[in-house]
Amino acid sequence: MEEEKSHVEVLLETGSDYARKKIELYKLKAIDKSADIVSTIAADITIVSILILFVLVINIGLALWLGELLGRTYYGFFVVAGFYLLSGIIFYTFRDKLIKYPVRNSIIKHALKLD
């Protein structure tokens, strides 16, 4: 009888070790996914920040150049602002197709690692 008890105890101990290891594995997988998502977001924010600065400087130069061509400096800024107003209207109209769905799908792809 004592031998059976020891087998049961061994079985329970092995089962509890397995459960602890499984919980630890899930924790490590969650940390890995979180780190991957955060590092991807940080890299994307850095790239987008640099691109925003580039576009800003290009737009100022374009506005000044157009203003020189049109005879008044502020005309160039009006033309560039009109372009961005038109672009904003187009993006607003098609925001789901152009922005919402691709961003959502990208987040899901990164979270599930469907590379």
Image (tube, grey):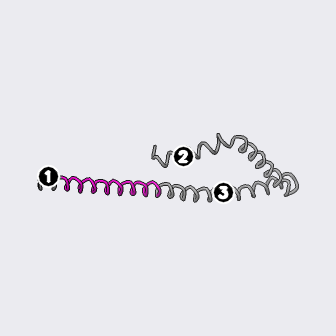
Q: Residues within 10 Å of mark 1 (few under 14, many from 20)?
A: few
Cα distance between the residues tagged 2 and 1: 54 Å
Q: What's the mark number on residue 4?
A: 1
Residue at left offset 39%, top offset 57%: 28
Asked whether residue 2 is drawn in magenta, I would say: no
**x and y percentages locating residue 32 in the rendered image:** 42, 56
Q: Kindly identify the amino acid type of the residue bearing the numbered disc 2.
A: Ser
Give the percent coordinates (x, y) of residue 3: 11, 54
Q: Residue at position x 57%, y 45% from top?
A: 104
Q: Which residue is mark 3?
A: 52
- First-in-chain label (3 vs 2): 3
Residue at the location (31% across, 56% down)? 21
Q: Is residue 115 visible?
A: no
User: Contact (CB < 8 A) between labels 3 and 2?
Assistant: no
Could you tell me which secondary element the residue under label 2 belongs to? Answer: helix
Q: Tell us which disc is closer to us: 3 or 2.
A: 2
Is 57 displayed left or right of 5 in the figure?
Answer: right
Q: 10 Å neighbourhood of mark 3: few (<14), some, or many (≥20)?
A: few
Closer to the camera: disc 2 or disc 1?
1
Residue 115 location (% of width, % of height): 46, 44
Tell me which segment is drawn in magenta: 8-34
Residue 18 location in percent, x, y? 28, 54
The residue lying at 45 percent from left, 47 percent from top is 113
Q: Earlier in the sequence, mark 2 or mark 1?
A: 1
Amino acid type at mark 3: Ile
Q: Left of 73 or right of it: where is 12?
A: left
Nearer to the camera, 96 or 65 = 96
Which residue in the protein does label 2 denote?
106
Is residue 3 visible in this depiction of the protein?
yes
Label 1's element?
helix
Amino acid type at mark 1: Glu
